[in-house]
Image: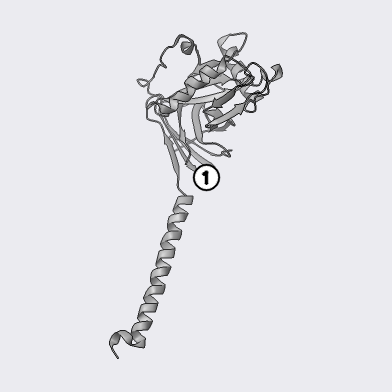
């Protein structure tokens, strides 16, 4: 009998197979667990990243061209690095024939708060707001301005599932601050059966599904916050920082979700 046929050798081969299989299973489980715990990082530089808000409605016949223009930002290199887009669907068109399923009263109130801060008596759609200021450049075919020369502080957001950890490093900013989160739906559409857009299939990008806020607290010289976010159905996330009780963003970041 050769050594290869001995019980000792057969036992060694079996033991090696068991250990090897167990090790492989362990490595696979560690890898899968790592995927489940994988963090998503959104981070601005120190320069200003613009928050671009579009106030729109499926009941408004003038809005689809503005939404189409906003949608093309996803093909631009500036997306998330220089500009963070958010489409807020307002509800004040809902009583005129078609109810926009993405509209929220809070978004209409937000637009009115902007108008009040500018001393404007009314609101309209499509309406663009750039860094807290009314921007009418889209109507004239102007290019979106950039603010890269402005120092705004570094905004860092780490997502672990629906848990967000925020750090805003801006030593020159000593005021109480708030961080705002807008989960965004992408590639969504509606078949409009009434109102000004009757018979149209409207496609949307960067649609705010919720808007939540948390206060930042000073920790080791930086302002931080933790929040649980309503990310169900979201494909991207916009995040920005303002002074407390202010609409004007100081810094913004965001990105697509894993």
Where in the figure is residue 168, as x and y percent of width and height?
A: 44, 33
- Examine the rendered structure and indicate whether residue 162 appears above or below residue 104: below
Say which of 63 and 173 sits in front: 63
Name the image quarter holding residue 147: top left
Name the image quarter holding residue 76: top left
- Examine the rendered structure and indicate whether residue 83 appears above or below residue 8: above
Q: Is residue 187 left or right of residue 79?
A: right
At x 40%, y 31%, the residue is 44
Where in the figure is residue 177, as x and y percent of width and height?
A: 51, 28
Say which of 253 and 199 sits in front: 199
Q: Is residue 257 left or right of residue 11?
A: right
Q: Residue furthest bottom?
A: 1
Name the image quarter holding residue 91: top right
- Examine the rendered structure and indicate whether residue 91 appears above or below residue 117: below
Tell me, what colour scheme is on the image? one colour
Is residue 249 visible from the viewing direction of this image? no
Where in the figure is residue 66, as x and y percent of width and height?
A: 51, 18
Q: Is residue 242 left or right of residue 98?
A: left
> In this figure, what is the number of numbered marks?
1
At x 54%, y 26%, the residue is 204
- Characterize the local packing of mark 1: few (<14), some (14-19) or many (20 or more) Cα atoms within 10 angstroms: some
At x 40%, y 15%, the residue is 143
Q: Residue furthest front?
A: 199
At x 40%, y 16%, the residue is 145
- For label 1, the residue is 161
- Examine the rendered structure and indicate whether residue 258 appears above or below residue 25: above
Which SS class for mark 1?
loop
Say which of 67 and 171 sits in front: 67
Where in the figure is residue 138, as x and y percent of width and height?
A: 47, 13
Is residue 224 visible from the viewing direction of this image? yes
For the N terminus, give its image quadrant: bottom left
């Amino acid at each position: 009998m050769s050594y290869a046929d001995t019980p000792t050798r057969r036992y060694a081969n079996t033991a090696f197979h068991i250990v090897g299989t167990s090790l492989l299973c362990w490595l696979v489980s560690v890898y899968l667990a790592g995927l489940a715990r994988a963090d998503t990082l959104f981070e601005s530089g120190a320069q200003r990243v613009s928050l671009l808000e579009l106030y729109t409605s499926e009941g408004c016949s003038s809005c689809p061209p503005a939404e189409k223009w906003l949608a093309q930002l996803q093909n631009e290199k500036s997306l998330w690095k220089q500009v963070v887009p958010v489409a807020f669907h307002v509800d004040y068109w809902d009583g005129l024939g078609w109810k926009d399923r993405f509209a929220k009263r809070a978004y209409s109130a937000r637009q009115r708060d902007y108008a009040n801060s500018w001393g404007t008596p009314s609101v309209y759609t499509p309406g663009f707001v750039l860094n807290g200021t009314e921007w009418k450049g889209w109507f004239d075919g102007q290019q979106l301005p950039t603010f890269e020369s402005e120092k705004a502080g570094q905004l860092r957001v780490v997502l672990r599932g629906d848990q967000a950890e925020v750090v805003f490093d801006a030593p020159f900013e000593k005021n109480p601050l708030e961080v705002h989160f807008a989960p965004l739906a992408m590639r969504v559409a509606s078949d409009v059966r009434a109102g000004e857009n009757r018979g149209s299939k409207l496609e949307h990008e960067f649609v705010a599904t919720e808007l939540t806020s948390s206060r930042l607290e000073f920790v080791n010289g930086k302002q931080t916050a933790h929040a649980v976010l309503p990310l169900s159905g979201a494909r991207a996330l916009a995040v920005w920082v303002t002074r407390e009780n202010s609409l004007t963003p100081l810094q913004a970041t965001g990105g697509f979700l894993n």
